[in-house]
Amino acid sequence: MALNRRQFLQASTATLASTSLVACGGEEPVVIDTSLPVGPFNAYSTAEEVTSGIDLTGKTALVTGCNSGIGYETMRVLALRGAHVFGTGRTLEKAQKACASVSGKTTPVALELSDFDSCVACARAVAAQTDSLDILIPNAGIGSFSDFELINGIEKIFVVNYLGHVVLTMNLLPLVQAAERGRIVHVGSQMGYKSTPEAGIDFDNLRGEAEFDAFEAYGRSKLANALFSLKLSMMLDPAKTTSNVVHPGFVDSNIGRNADGIIGFLYNTVADLIKKDVAEGAATQVYVATNPLLEGVSGAYFEDCNPVRINIPNHVFDVELANRLWRETQEMVGSYYSGTLSA
Ligand SMILES: NC(=O)c1ccc[n+]([C@@H]2O[C@H](COP(=O)([O-])OP(=O)(O)OC[C@H]3O[C@@H](n4cnc5c(N)ncnc54)[C@H](OP(=O)(O)O)[C@@H]3O)[C@@H](O)[C@H]2O)c1
């Protein structure tokens, strides 16, 4: 994949920015939101540490992308704590292999996010095996190291990271609502406020109408994850079902597997020095999915195991944009789920 100079600079900036380290003298881009419960954990906490003493026996969870990186560790630790975890892979074989390699109760399911029929089938397969889902973590995703491609006429990163998860989540929502207290934890990214088009979601460029910028496309898809979380939090009763979004950190996973050239070299070698390992990378989403402190907390955004406010211009809490995205989303994929919620 050829990268232009801007993409190179954005990747370098993203690499540095993702460490959560603040440049000397600069204002913190995010600050802990003390209006919400703040726990004792931080960027170096691991998924095992944040669940120490938490018994998930009797709980049911679903994690997408269970065969790799953050999703694998998320599934492993939830199962370790006693949850029955449905783990999805792009093929049943991949999911089976991952599920078989962890201790505890896991069930493999196939899910190809670029195929909306597969998303519906995945939800149906899960519904055939459980009456409720306490935890839903739409975690799978592709990074910014990919070329422009349309899937059913819509840009691929947006389809895989966002639209596929909307179809899956909306089809699983009755199960999450059937749980005594269901939690949906969306996996966003700092790139959702550091690397988006100016408008946040450029609705006039979702079908390849203008120039393709892979980093902006990734940021846009991750902002869409955050806005979907916000929209769900507005539509659901937080006393019963919560919806939050996290940035896992800059994590040493397989997400940079397609990076090549100088960027690929830097991303997969030098950047390793500042990346979290997957045990730390899974901590924030596992914390938000399980910690009793967060009962009833919905519509929040988390980094390094804490709720944060964003101090730089962003669209993460933009209600108007969330509403517009929801309307456009229903036009794009609304036929794949029956709406039990009002917009
Ligand atoms: N790593 C980071 O620094 C970082 C930072 C911010 C946010 N995130 C987010 O964290 C999440 C997990 O990523 P990761 O870092 O753990 O990356 P990863 O190791 O590459 O894992 C990604 C997972 O998503 C699955 N996936 C990819 N395309 C899919 C598709 N079309 N349908 C279904 N599943 C698909 C992959 O399956 P295959 O293995 O079969 O391709 C894999 O299981 C992503 O949402 C990512 O955006 C990561």
Image: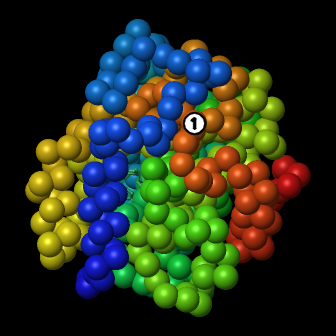
Write the residue at 50% across / 32% down.
Answer: 31
> In front: 119, or 289?
289
Rendering coords of residue 273 (x, y %): 14, 45
Outermost residue toward the top in this view: 53
Task: Say which quarter of the image contains residue 328.
Answer: bottom right
Write the residue at 46% across / 83% down.
Answer: 212
> In front: 215, or 50?
215
Write the residue at 34% across / 57% down.
Answer: 14
61 lies above or below 188: above
Crowding at dot 1, Cα within 10 Å, few <14 / some 14-19 / many 20+, comes out as: some
Task: Say which quarter of the image contains residue 6.
Answer: bottom left
Rendering coords of residue 24 (x, y %): 30, 39
Task: Say which quarter of the image contains residue 45.
Answer: top left
| Amino acid at the residue labelled 1 | Arg
Rendering coords of residue 311 (x, y %): 55, 42
Ligand 1 located in image quadrant: bottom left
The quadrant of the image that shows the N terminus is: bottom left
The quadrant of the image that shows the C terminus is: bottom right
Compared across the picture, whether 4 is left or right of 205 comes to left
Compared across the picture, whether 224 is left or right of 108 comes to right
Judge whether residue 99 can be spotted in this image: no
Outermost residue toward the front in this view: 25
The residue under label 1 is 309
Write the residue at 30% across / 82% down.
Answer: 4
Instruction: Please say which color scheme the image uses.
Output: rainbow
Q: What element carries label 1?
A: strand
145 lies above or below 181: below
Rendering coords of residue 91 (x, y %): 38, 62
Judge whether residue 324 can be spotted in this image: yes
